[in-house]
Image: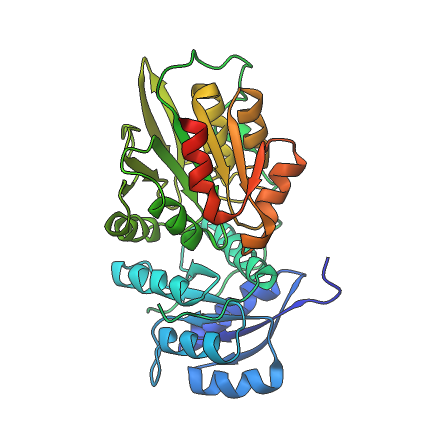
Amino acid sequence: MKDRKIRVLIVDDSAVVRQTMDKVLNSDPDIEVIGHAPDPFVAAERIKTLVPDVITLDVEMPRMDGLTFLRKIMTQHPIPVVMCSTLTVEGSETALRALEYGAVEVITKPKMGTKQFLEEARIRICDAVKAAAMARPVRSTGSRGAAPTFSAVHKVAPKLTADAVLPPPTGKAMVQTTEKIIAVGASTGGTEALREFLQAMPADAPGIVIVQHMPENFTRAFADRLNTLCRVTVKEAADNDSVIRGRALIAPGSKHMMLKRSGARYFVEVRDGPLVSRHRPSVDVLFRSAARYGGKNVVGVIMTGMGDDGARGMKEMKDAGAYNIAQDEASCVVFGMPKEAIKHGGVDVVKPLNLIAQEVVRAAG
């Protein structure tokens, strides 16, 4: 546990958004907002004296846009950055570029909604900042609307397990077939890790199902971008999509995704549900479904990310006969999820990121 609070600088041209983010972040006992800036020029001056642990940065601002400022930060004075974006196609694409330029996480700006919606947004924003504070900044290679003020902070509900969406496995996985399935979970740092992994997979790779913690809308832009870079086809999953060779399905943001099977056909079910392990989509939900419907046919992969989402589900997959791989600490942005999966006893082998695809192909052969 940190001996002091995580110090955050909020950079956004909207005073209402700055006020909202201030209330959201200060509601967490481990986080302290130490300053605000309406644009990157003011932010640059604030950084010199305030020395924040994490910066939350708006994508669209006057005088200098967030991407340009991000690249300057990463090349001159790396500080973990969480990008704040609106739920638009353009915003999603810009946010993905921000992750390539060195941002640790991307979140959507809080907006008006139900009490549950606001509480879930608070959890996501605070967790993103905590993940960023744990990340190791990497120097870049170069490759709006008003928001409401949150109401009083609500007590956080107990952290739910996959039981909230899918019953535990019965202990008997379905009979093995000739088709293998690759089940992958990732969070902080996962967008770049998944890009490297998927680019290394052959065109005829076994069907791949992926949960990457991202907001809704962003997963579609992410999948579309990967589809232009990889030999396998990559798409945002839709309910009842078949899991077939040469295709990777990425769970849509804000929806759980489960592997299902009918006879010899594997497919996915995409549906709503509560946050599981503080996330939706949840890796635990995907992995539990893989244990139930895939069993020995599954090769599991858990990648960089904060928290323990996927740890219990990976153990269930191993108990059902799956072969599981964890990304090693040296190549992780945050070694939380793989570390927890190893502690739970669900991992067969630990590999650096650049060797995971090779190990998956070997195990699925």
Q: Is residue 116 visible?
A: no
Would residue 356 appear left or right of 311 to someone viewing this image? left
Quarter of the image with the C terminus is top left
What residue lies at 50% left-to-right and 44% top-to-bottom? 279
What residue lies at 43% left-to-right and 82% top-to-bottom? 40
Residue 144: x, y in percent?
33, 69
Residue 252 position by quadrant: top left
Q: Looking at the image, is 96 positioned above or below residue 326?
A: below
Would residue 228 appear left or right of 87 to someone viewing this image? left
Q: Is residue 256 visible?
A: yes
Q: Looking at the image, is 327 positioned above or below residue 131?
A: above
Q: Looking at the image, is 57 positioned above or below residue 100?
A: below
What residue lies at 35% left-to-right and 29% top-to-bottom? 269
The total number of labels drawn is 0
- Name, please, the residue furthest toward the right: 3
Residue 232: x, y in percent?
27, 40
> Which sits in the foreground, 41 or 298?
298
Residue 45: x, y in percent?
52, 88
> Which sits in the foreground, 284 or 78?
78
Q: According to the image, what is the colour scheme of the structure?
A: rainbow
Quarter of the image with the N terminus is bottom right
Would residue 291 appear left or right of 226 to someone viewing this image? right
> Which sits in the foreground, 36 or 69?
69
Residue 173: x, y in percent?
48, 15
What residue lies at 61% left-to-right and 82% top-to-bottom? 50
